[in-house]
Image (cartoon, grey):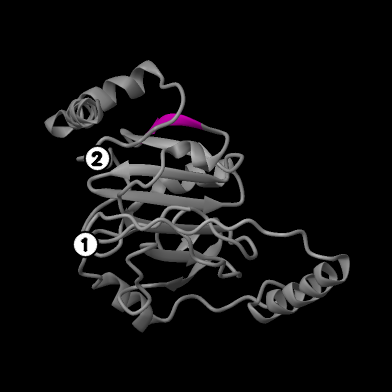
């Protein structure tokens, strides 16, 4: 699991081996999980749209541009936004659409599935994208992007940010990507997003259009990254 810090440093999350739980323990855990899902509103009760004050607070988020798709998405209202009060530099700042607030994570998370969650985080990398599992690289809104989680999740690389979309399916994820626009300053959902000022760590093949976009990033970011890596490797020998 990746965790990003505002100063672009990465802190690796510990990896522990887990023993297989006894069947009785698994049953107890399942009962507890059902209880939690009932509490968080994932059953038949839907939360109201976001309060005016909470949305206003998100609009004044001061640290960097955060993205949303408006006050609703496919008839699902915007129900929550982190803003400054809920901001955690390790996972970014999120907006939530629908009736079930899932656990926050920079690369997904557990819990029940929201119709849509958009997380904006300062880009940094601890591990290459192969840790996301099966994926493919695409060009969306003029910027590099990766599709993973069986198409339900996207990461778009823009400016110094990673914009992460978690949804019910690929159609919703792509639609959300087309509608992305800044929440805390002026902007629209038309045209290209700002090109990344870094070289995204993509895993797997790239289309010619994507290769061209990567080659023409500002300040030749990918060429600089390759040169830096080459120098580091030469120092090891």
Residue 147, compared with residue 23, is above or below; it is above
The image quadrant of residue 54 is: bottom left
Residue 232 coordinates in the image, percent (x, y) = 22, 32
Please tell me whether the stretch drawn in magenta is mainly helix, strand or loop.
strand
- Which of pointers 1 and 2 indicates the residue nearer the eye? 2
Q: Residue at x 84, y 66 (%)?
A: 22
Residue 29 coordinates in the image, percent (x, y) = 77, 72
On the image, numbered disc 1 is attached to which residue? 185
Quadrant where the C terminus lies?
A: top left
Which residue is more in the foreground, 18 or 203?
A: 18
Residue 226, compared with residue 172, is above or below; it is above
Q: CA distance from mark 1 to mark 2?
A: 19 Å
The image quadrant of residue 44 is: bottom right
On the image, numbered disc 2 is attached to which residue? 196
Outermost residue to the left: 219
Query: On the picture, is 35 further left or further right than 100?
Result: right
First in sequence, mark 1 or 2: give its number.
Answer: 1
Query: On the picture, is 68 further left or further right than 14?
Result: left
Query: On the picture, is 20 further left or further right than 178?
Result: right
Residue 190 coordinates in the image, percent (x, y) = 30, 43
For the magenta stretch, what is the residue range? 136-140
Element under label 1? loop
Outermost residue to the front: 237
Magenta-span inclusion, residue 56: no
Which residue is more in the foreground, 18 or 65?
A: 18
Element under label 2? loop
How packed is label 2: few (under 14 Cα within 10 Å), some, or many (20 or more)?
Answer: many
């Amino acid at each position: 699991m990746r965790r990003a810090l505002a100063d672009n440093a990465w802190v690796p999350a510990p990896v522990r081996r887990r023993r297989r739980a006894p069947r009785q323990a698994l049953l107890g855990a399942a009962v507890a999980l059902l209880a939690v899902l009932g509490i968080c509103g994932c059953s038949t009760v839907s939360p109201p749209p976001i309060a005016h004050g909470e949305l206003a607070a998100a609009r004044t988020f001061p640290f960097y541009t955060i993205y949303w798709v408006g006050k609703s998405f496919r008839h699902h209202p915007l129900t929550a936004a982190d803003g400054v009060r809920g901001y955690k530099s390790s996972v970014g700042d999120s907006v939530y659409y629908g009736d079930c607030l899932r656990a926050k994570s920079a690369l997904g998370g557990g819990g029940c599935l929201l119709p849509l969650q958009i997380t904006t985080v300062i880009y940094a990398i601890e591990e290459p994208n192969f840790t996301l599992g099966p994926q493919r690289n695409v060009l969306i809104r003029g910027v590099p992007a990766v599709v993973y989680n069986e198409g339900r999740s996207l990461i778009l690389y823009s400016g110094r940010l990673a914009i992460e979309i978690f949804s019910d399916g690929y159609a919703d994820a792509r639609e959300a990507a087309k509608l992305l626009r800044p929440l805390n300053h002026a902007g629209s959902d038309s045209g290209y997003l700002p090109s990344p000022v870094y070289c995204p760590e993509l895993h797997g093949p790239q289309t010619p259009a994507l290769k061209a976009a990567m080659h023409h990033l500002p300040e030749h970011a990918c060429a600089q990254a390759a040169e830096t890596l080459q120098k580091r490797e030469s120092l090891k020998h």
